[in-house]
Amino acid sequence: MRNLLTIARKEATVISRDRVALLIMLAMPLALIFILGSALGSIGEGDSLSIDVAIVNEDVGETGKLFVDGLTSSKELAALFNIDVSNDAAAVRADVEKGNLTAALIIPSNLTEKITAGEPIGLEVIQDPGSKIAGGIWVSVVKAGTANASAQIIAGKVLTEELAAAAGAGAGGPRARGPGASAGPMLTPPQLPPMTFDAVAVREIEAKVDARISMISYYAAGMTGMFLLFGSMFGAFSFVQERREQTLARMLSTPASRLAIVGGKAIGVLMIGVGQFTVLFLGTRLLFGVDWGQSVAATLMIGFAEALAAAGLAMTLAALGKTERSIGGIAPAAIMLFAATGGSMVPTEQLPKFLLPVQVISPVYWTVNGFLDVMRGATVADVLPNIAAILAIGAALFAFGVWRLRFE
Amino acid sequence: MASIVEVTDLVKRFGDFTAVDGVSFSIEEGEIFGLLGPNGAGKTTTISTISCLLAPDGGDVTVGGHSVRSDVTAVKRELGVVPQEIALYPTLSAGENLAFWGRMYGLSGAALKKAVDDALLLAGLEDRSKERVEKYSGGMKRRINIAAGILHTPRVLLMDEPTVGIDPQSRNHILETVKELNGKGMTVLYTSHYMEEVEFLCDRIAIMDHGKIIAMGTLNELRAVVGGMDVVDVKVESVSDLVLEQVRAIPGVKQATRTEDALQVLTPGSGSVLGKLVATLESEGSHVTSIAVTEPNLESVFLHLTGKSLRD
């Protein structure tokens, strides 16, 4: 155990003094997070011509249907929004909370009844505060619609009152209004319904969780997931260098066992990964304001799990590559494949389905999605399957590496 | 004195190639034992088997009574190893390197610090212990390479060609260091293809060629193999194959071998040979620049036994 820790400490020291390693493992991900995050803004906002919204019409009367028809039949609105009409309010609320929808309009079941009774009624608009611009457009549209509806209802009501008054005059004498009508019974204007533009009011209810993830947060997760694996490349480099420069042979001539040597080198890579993750986690928070979510423990556990997977990958790379050059070819290719299929570059939902088998064996996939879930409010318990998957992949890579490793 | 290292019928193969072929020798405690032979003779393979880096295919090795076949950890604890390559971490300082190797042998705390300080003193680099090894000269690296092998004061120090590629000053420092360590009671197994080093250092010497020991004994015992012969070293501009054959045909010439710019002749009576030798060389256009007659040395022993130079 002592030898294992001695080797781990030495390994971490040697790798941390490699300027190229530091550049690739720390400077590059921070630069890419900043460039990609800044260039692409936030998910959803950059895609302003197809804002995903939903309408749930629970109104049993005609008014709600008229309202829905008004919103869905407009060509102008169709150019701006992907409007989904649903009956399931709970599902729509959940989609907004998850960030799948930018905003939603919930029409209550008693809309027609309240309007008929002349009572004020509210519509509910759920808006994701993470997409204030896109969500705000939807709110404006709904408000405009309600204002228009209110005006029509008032106009209709006034007309109804006047017609009723006219009918009353015909039956029981005129109830004149205005100048010259002071004699006789006092004529009063019709009582306006307590419905003005506020009669159909919009209430903004923010989604419970800051579910929409800004691009910079997305790429913080994506690039961290990808670049944490680069520690494995430098761990493999170190193994090959030690083999070539005979420090490995010298280590083997000490009382340290082969298991201690392999374990120590793997733990060294793990230490580098943990340090790298700490820098990226804090760096993205402090420099770019990335919100990694409420559960810091969950984020740290995912990062630690991937650093372990990187240690396992280091052993596999050291087993597969005989020289630094060959590892320098294999490692970036493998890591980029893991990253591309794992969601480091584009969300995995946008990738073709046939990539699913590759995604499942990619530690980056489980890591990035775990990070994103935590950003959306997931807890440690929620991401345990991700952590288990990352550890299983890491263990398989470590076992394969140790099986195929050459010491001479 | 008791043997601390026993090598018995050692065999090591790499595929069809037999690198070590039935080698046997023993090293007494407190002795400096030399393994001399040209590159590829099997010296490094032998030392790698003793240090448990390679498992023997035949025979056995014991160190301090522990067999490399059954008690590897105990064997390793008895040994210090100085490999042929500079097996150090270039981005670590000399002090960090030594501390690492000391820890690998179980040293810690004050004992580790003392061992590192002593090793730096022995290497003459105590003032530069904080510098990264990558900034050291080749000779300095060699000295730290040796220091890393003796931190834990092993009973047996295995040194595999520790002076390859260094300046004469550093070489002398290393040879003196080996003498100093041996003076403190450390047993040393020293391999080299430089006969001068082996002659200077070793109490007993085994000469290896093609995986076998072809002669073994003290320096004087080995010289006696050559008997009362003289060694004639001739510096020439060039020696063709034809000239070499003509030299070998001179009566009284027992053996003749050439290097790049020299010819070495083994003869029982140099007086009767010198004239014919020079005449033969000059007549064939091989201009002689100097000629010297010396006592037999390990080079001439090797020449006598194998018909070729150590540096061939």
Image (cartoon, coloured by chain):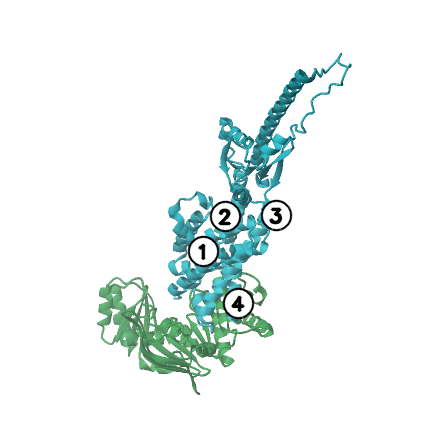
Chain colours: A cyan, B green
Mark in the foreground, 4 or 2: 2
Mark in the foreground, 3 or 1: 3
Q: Contact, CB < 8 Å: mark 3 with mark 2?
A: no
Mark sitting earlier along the chain (2/1): 2
Q: Quadrant of residue A102?
A: top right
Foreground: B55 or B46?
B55
Task: Say if residue A34 shows up in the picture.
Answer: no
Mark sitting earlier along the chain (4/2): 4
> What numbered label is drawn on residue A233?
1
The chain letter for the residue carrying disc 1 is: A
**Image location (x, y in percent) of residue A316:** 41, 59
Q: CA distance from mark 3 to mark 4?
A: 32 Å
Instruction: Say which element carries label 2.
Output: helix
Q: CA distance from mark 4 to mark 2?
A: 31 Å
The chain letter for the residue carrying disc 3 is: A
Mark sitting earlier along the chain (1/4): 4
Characterize the local packing of mark 3: few (<14), some (14-19) or many (20 or more) Cα atoms within 10 angstroms: few
Instruction: Say which element carries label 1.
Output: helix
Question: At x 52% / y 32%, what residue is drawn?
Answer: A65
Q: CA distance from mark 1 to mark 4?
A: 21 Å
Q: The residue under label 2 is which amino acid type?
A: Gly
Foreground: A273 or A243?
A273
> What numbered label is drawn on residue A5?
4
Q: On screen, A43 above or below B16?
A: above
Foreground: B46 or B287?
B46
